[in-house]
Image: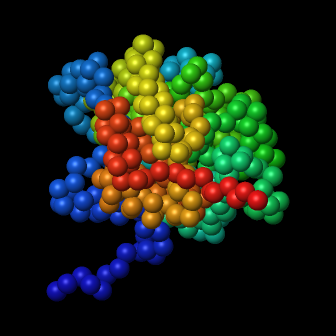
Amino acid sequence: MSLSWITPADRVQKLPPYVFARLDELKAKAREQGLDLIDLGMGNPDGATPQPIIDAGIAALQNPANHGYPPFEGTATFRQAITKWYNRRYGVQLDSDTEALPLLGSKEGLGHLAIAYINPGDTVLVPSPSYPVHFRGPIIAGGVIHNITLKEENNWLIDLNSIPEEVAQKAKILYFNYPSNPTGATAPREFFEEIVAFARKYEILLVHDLCYAELAFDGYQPTSLLEIPGAKDIGVEFHTLSKTYNMAGWRVGFVVGNRHVIQGLRTLKTNLDYGIFSALQTAAKTALELPDSYLEEVQTRYRTRRDFLIQGLGELGWNVAKTKATMYLWVKCPVGMGSTDFALDVLQKTGVVVTPGNAFGVGGEGYVRISLIADCDRLGEALARFKKAGICYQQEAVVSV
Ligand SMILES: *Cc1c(COP(=O)(O)O)cnc(C)c1O
């Protein structure tokens, strides 16, 4: 007997197709055809996890005390390492028992937060483009998404004035993320002050994703939501070890901020998972305690790639602004070409994988995201293939009269 009569729940069926999954299929096909793929499509750092973290993990693996179920709320030592790190970086004091919660990667927490706080029909404000779980989590929870369309002429910042009064009145949660994936945009401190005032006025839970807290360049230091006075009353902030420490496969993130919100998320998670393997929490603590010289190394790696690729794309007609943070370039499609068509064209002609901007919502249409997850040799090879295939950006013809 087949199970053809059983269908996934509406909450799964209602999800728009996950573009990364479709991209994976196309990549597999291209590989079968023998293409040497240069994959700049994912947000998966290419470097190895630093050795001290691996060593701490190996030692912790040998300890049978770590082999049982970890505590639901994360180990006390990791939570204390989180609040110490947070205080060192931002000068803000947090209570490690109630205001910090380890997560199985921040994506897990961002998604589960939606399940914990959104009732079917609740309005959720989400910028477009944005990191997919910021809208997919709320969709799964049955929320009604109000897209805040971001615009290049506004430096991809949320224009709070563009949110209609009646929408702001009924909105329950606002997700946002600066430095931003996918646009690479950063927000000045004044923006954080504005958004906190907005959320306090309309009683909206602010959910900030600060996953690129440390991947910043040229002396720029990203702002944390909780640095803003009054933010802890209405907000939480998500962090991850995946990007800074090349630990994407380890699945370690955390959330800090409002204790009531964290308690709600903890209650949900207690019913669904057991949290992170204790040995990995020991290793993660080591990561947060690495000296700043490590950060300089990572920052230099991405900055060098950023400069190299911006220069190369410039020779092909693109004028890409220097991003102050993240590991992405947000690149305009050639005039008259949509995101999906351009990404497929690039893949077919060059074997270079870039992500169509519409994977991040309708607001990403007309752009592709290029991840700086290959060394300059490979990036140079990608540029050479672009050139050979005639892939370039042409300005709209200036009509002279
Ligand atoms: C990579 C990324 C995440 C996911 O991080 P994990 O901790 O690995 O789940 C979350 N938010 C943004 C914006 C990201 O780019």
Quarter of the rendering containing residue 57: top left
What residue do we see at 47% from left, 51% from top? 392
The answer to whether residue 40 is seen in the rendering is no
Residue 123 position (above or below residue 315): below
Q: Position of residue 368 (x, y in %)?
A: 49, 53
For this rendering, which residue is in front, 50 or 370? Answer: 370
Expressed as whole percent of the image width and height from the top left, the position of residue 181 reads 52, 44
Look at the image and tell me whether residue 185 can be seen.
Answer: yes
In the displayed structure, 35 sits above or below 255; it is below
Quarter of the rendering containing residue 399: bottom right
The N terminus is located in which quarter? bottom left
Q: Residue at position x 36%, y 38% from top?
A: 379
Task: Answer with the quarter of the image where residue 72 lies.
Answer: top left
From the viewer's perspective, tell me whether residue 159 is left or right of residue 93: right
Q: For the C terminus, which image quadrant?
A: bottom right
Task: Kindly identify the residue that appears in the image at 45 percent across and 17 percent down.
Answer: 296
Q: Vertically, is 179 above or below 6? A: above
Q: Position of residue 221 (x, y in %)?
A: 60, 24
Q: Residue furthest front?
A: 401
